[in-house]
Amino acid sequence: MQIRLLTALLSTGIALALSHGGDVRAQASWPERPVRIVVGYPPAGGADLTARTVADVLTRQLGQPIVIENKPGATTTIAAETVARSAPDGYTLFIAQPFNFGIDKVFMKGLNYDGARDFAPVTQWVSAPLVLVVNDKLEAKSVAQLIDLLKKSPGKYFYSTVGNGGVTHLAGVYFNDVNKTDMVQVPFKGGAQGAQALLTGEVQLSFASGPTVMPMVNAGKLRALAVTSEKRSSVVPGVPSVAESGVKGFEIIVSFGLVGPTGMQPAVIKRLFDASVHSLADPGVIDRLAKQAIEAAPSASPEAYRAWLLREGEKQGALARQSGATLD
């Protein structure tokens, strides 16, 4: 009996040691080649600029090149499925957002991935309010004036988005719902295209990411009326929030973070988490992001990031269902 017990204990100890040793070796040796990060939007938008800004420093942290691959289409679900179906070896990662954790299923049937099941969250990278901007020729110079204008002419004014079901779309749906207005969405493949449509007058307003529109606001080509965070944002100084402007309780933000396929080794996730936190604390990264109206905001842990993604996905998914918005 004692011999069998001793043998069992030794076997368990050896197994644990081998497992721990495997994790240590994985953390020590990974990465041994370039790491690919897939972005579900075209170049020059908020997700792309975030990925490239952080990747510059993350390359030094990991000791291997970070390759950014833009794979736009179907409101990021093409890119998401690509990564979800990739080998869980840490070499193919994805810039995710709450949309990929439940909102996508509200708008799109027959998806071949499930965010909660198929992704291993690492950490949030950044958060940022959207910026409510209008064409400089539009007479509205405040949120209140914009609401009055929209109510007087329902269906006449158009807002650009980066695709049906995304946060820029839901912000407009939310705004219409709480203010009883009827502005019409015009989806584009990316933020840069939507901003160009704003400049030409094809659309009159947008809930856009800061990196996409703030350079044009600063140049006097567009007018910023408000930010969509509950309070004013330090990265968009001098601009009031929608809630502060009279639409009580209005809040919806942009968040981008790093995930990989389910099944990645814990040691690889930890290495990515630690390298991300160090990269996001780099003064150059903080400064470059702030200039694009984005705040570095790493999660407390991979587990905390997963919990937040699921909560936010459920909240925004409920908004999508309640709004009756569709992809048509």
Image (cartoon, grey):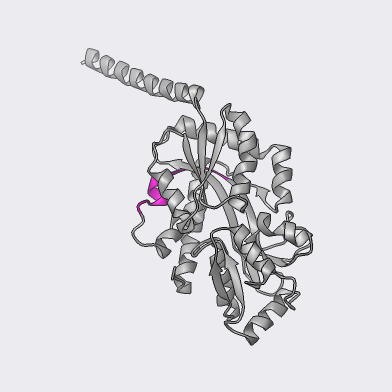
Residue shown at 48% from the left, 54% from the top: 76
As for residue 119 lying within the magenta part, the answer is yes
Q: x%, y% of residue 250?
A: 62, 69
* Quarter of the image that includes the C terminus: bottom left
Nearest to the observer: residue 238 or residue 310: 238
Would you say residue 242 is visible in this rendering?
no
Nearest to the observer: residue 315 or residue 157: 157
Q: x%, y% of residue 126?
A: 62, 48
Residue extending farthest front: 200
Residue extending farthest bottom: 152
Q: Is residue 87 above or below residue 321?
A: above
In this picture, residue 121 sits left or right of residue 151: left
Would you say residue 289 is visible in this rendering?
yes
Residue extending farthest left: 1
In this picture, residue 158 sits left or right of residue 141: left
Q: x%, y% of residue 47?
A: 58, 50
* Quarter of the image that includes the N terminus: top left
Residue shown at 47% from the left, 30% from the top: 267
Residue shown at 57% from the left, 50% from the top: 256
In this picture, residue 230 sits left or right of residue 71: right
Q: Is residue 256 above or below residue 232?
A: above
Residue shown at 44% from the left, 68% from the top: 327
Q: x%, y% of residue 246?
A: 69, 75
As for residue 273 lying within the magenta part, the answer is no
Q: Is residue 91 above or below residue 228?
A: above
The answer to which image quadrant residue 130 occupies is bottom right
Tally of numbered discs: 0
Magenta residue span: 112-124
